[in-house]
Image (cartoon, coloured by chain):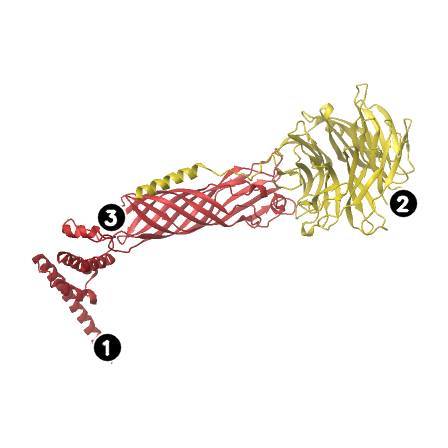
Amino acid sequence: MMKFTAYLFIIFTIIISSCVQPDEDSPAQEELFVKYYGVGADNEVVGIAQGANENTWILYGTTFTEDETPRPYLLEVNNAGTELKNNLADSAYRKLFEGFTGSVYPVKVKLDEGNEEYLVAGYYEYRVAGNDIYGGFWGTISKSDLTANLHKIDSMRIKDIIRTTEADGVDKYLLLCEANNLYKKGQVVPSSKGVDIVLSKRDMNDSVYWEKNHGFEGEDQGVSIFEKSNGHLIVVGYTEEENEYKGTNVFTLETTERGTSDLGSVVKGVTSLGNEGQINDDIPYSVIENNGSYSIVGEINKADGSRAGFYMQIGADAIPYISYELDSDYSKDCGLYAATLGSGNGVVAVGTVYDFNARKNEGYLTRLSATGKEESLDQHYGTISGNDAAKAIITLPDGDLLVGLTIAFGENSDKKMALLRLNKNGELKN
Amino acid sequence: MRRIFLLFIIFVLAGSYAFAQSCTQRLKDAEADFEAGKLTKIPDQLNNCLKTGGFSAEEEIRARKLLTLVYIFMDDESNAEDAFISLLRKDPEHDIDETDPQEFKSFYKQFQVDPILRISGKISTNLTNVNILQEYSPNGSTGDGEATTYSYGTGFGFEATADKYLGKGFEVSGGPQFRLSHFNVAGEVTGEDDYAVSYKFSMAALRVPVMMRYVFWAENVERKKVLPYVFAGLSADYLLKAGTKTTKRDGGIPFSDDLDFKKLDVIRPWNYSLLYGVGAKLRVKKVHFITFEARYDNSRRNFIKGNNRYVNPEISFDLANDPFDFHTNHISFSAGLNISLYNPKRLISE
């Protein structure tokens, strides 16, 4: 009996020792992650894009150098969120801004699939003799080594960039800009109507093919530009044009391939929930193509100081046909800054939910459709110590979501860029 | 009055001494009678002194053994059994002399002489090392940052066990243990010193280790003073509490809240461990021991609930440190007291 018990115990121990339980419920790092990036104390996310292959991504943002001036920061990460390389030491950038002491803000990054490049755009600002001077930068960044080919434009902030379809084999780029100059027949004159949206078509030799102003009295600013299959252009921005909606409203237009707006434009406001009589500012922040139409997300800044996200959908003719104000699951003010098509037919949008109890502003994710927001699926992310915001999102081939957040570890500066790989519902779990 | 009291004390002491002297003499007489084959008077000679406690401890053992022998030779099985059980109660694991009659040796084998159980109480200190199965560093940058480091922490424990001897040196041992342990973690959020994270990860566990022990010289008739042993076993472990202590995330507004991983549902409360070790029993008072032991414990399940790794903003964002998959290894050193419990009884009736 003694021997039997001893042998049984030894055999049992050997069996147990040889079978370590696998972690069935432990997702691999390629399935979920939270990663932080940044140089110095202050970094902000601008955008994310698919990388050189399906397992890499590009994160674009702003970092503040040692002399406190902002500058673009582009880095490539693998599918576990680990940085592979960045272009902080890029010589083209240094050459372009050599001796420049002002601020340089990146605005847009996107993958140019046909050219093995990323398209980037942004603007710079500086102050001379009490005057604010600004201009734009645009260019391409090589997929393979992140080296840049950058160009500057005076007096125009660049908000978006696309490479147009051309028959002559010469790459040309359409820049969505804003400026308070009028560009007519090669002549530039100051505008008396405030800031306008300006379309500028150029190539890598800085040849200007055409430049066109769009807008009204007051401030008109661009957000996104798209080229349709027939070469026409869809432009989304916002304007202070006085009309039935009052305040600042969404401005959409379709132009010909040469940027003339003879195809019409629309200024549209979002009907606010519960306070229809208020004068609100409806600011669009992101536009995505959505099965032949375009989905716009943004933020309503209300006269009473409250804020809410909004969703608007425009057709292929740039005419809005759906718009609604967002009511977050958390019954808090919110704003939407970026969107992507989810794995279903809906749109997944990210932004900020304001004053989230003790956690201050939190990064926010919600799911939208043409008929309204999907309830009880909102998500929030961020620290208790600062104001966090989700600024970018893309859908991965498997339906997962990749979200770029600015995470604040402190009150004002002390911000890091964060990349979150979420499941298709926006959750940090399988 | 005082004088009367002193006289009373002297009288009592003198009486006791005289009675003791008398019992010692009676035992000698009884042993002489036994040698002479005069058995019938012996029980009466000894029982009075046994009842009144007139023997010294050594004499009582001699007296009870003599009574057992007398009853065996008188074929009085019932009284022999009672006398022998009384002997074993007074002198557990009573040793047989080579000169003892064969009848006594045969009779001896019919009884449960060995302890039915040994119970131990131990206190221990431990060193805990974390065995990383998979890192999930929040640091996405590959710049100048240093890798997350993990280092030993110290803790303590206490344990109660029951040991059952199986024979031929093997014994099985098991019982509840409380163990408090921790290890240290230090890392960086983005590869910069000023955004650093550090904490102690503390685990309070209730465990039930069960082990098989081989004791050298366990059946050696010389009753060696030191009995070395080796053991191996398994333990079911339940975490009462687990989480960060002395938590610190620098950079921005420092975060210093200690996080309860069990409350946040990030940690699996149940685990099991393999354990191995060596030890020694130092004999005290013939059948009891002081034990010294070195033990290696190795938990086998990943402690982290992987699907809940990122669901708590306190961990992923405020602390900015992703829970990593891990086992733990513990080296502990303990000291304890091992007490033998007996229930002498006849196992075989002829």
Q: Which residue position holds label 3?
A: B223
Q: Which residue position holds label 1?
A: B5
Whether residues under marks 2 and 3 lie with C-beta atoms below 8 angstroms apart, the answer is no
A336 horizontally vs B173: left or right = right
Crowd band around label 1 with a 10 angstrom C-alpha radius: few (<14), some (14–19), many (20+): few
Nearer-the-camera pick, B22 or A275: A275
The colour of chain A is: yellow
Give the Cα distance between marks 2 and 1. 120 Å
- The residue depicted at 84 percent of the width and 50 percent of the height is A276
Crowd band around label 3 with a 10 angstrom C-alpha radius: few (<14), some (14–19), many (20+): some
Whether residues under marks 2 and 1 lie with C-beta atoms below 8 angstroms apart, the answer is no
Q: Point out the frontmost of discs 2 and 3.
A: 2
Question: Quick check: can you spot residue B100?
Answer: no
Quadrant location of residue A369?
Answer: top right
The colour of chain B is: red
Q: Point out the frontmost of discs 2 and 1.
A: 2
Chain designation of label 1: B
Q: Which residue position holds label 2?
A: A244
B326 horizontally vs B9: left or right = right
Chain designation of label 2: A
Give the Cα distance between marks 1 and 3. 48 Å
Q: Secondary structure at mark 2?
A: loop
Quadrant location of residue B197?
Answer: top right
A171 horizontally vs B81: left or right = right
- The three-letter amino acid code for the residue at tag 2 is Glu
In the rendered image, the quadrant that contains the C terminus of chain A is top right
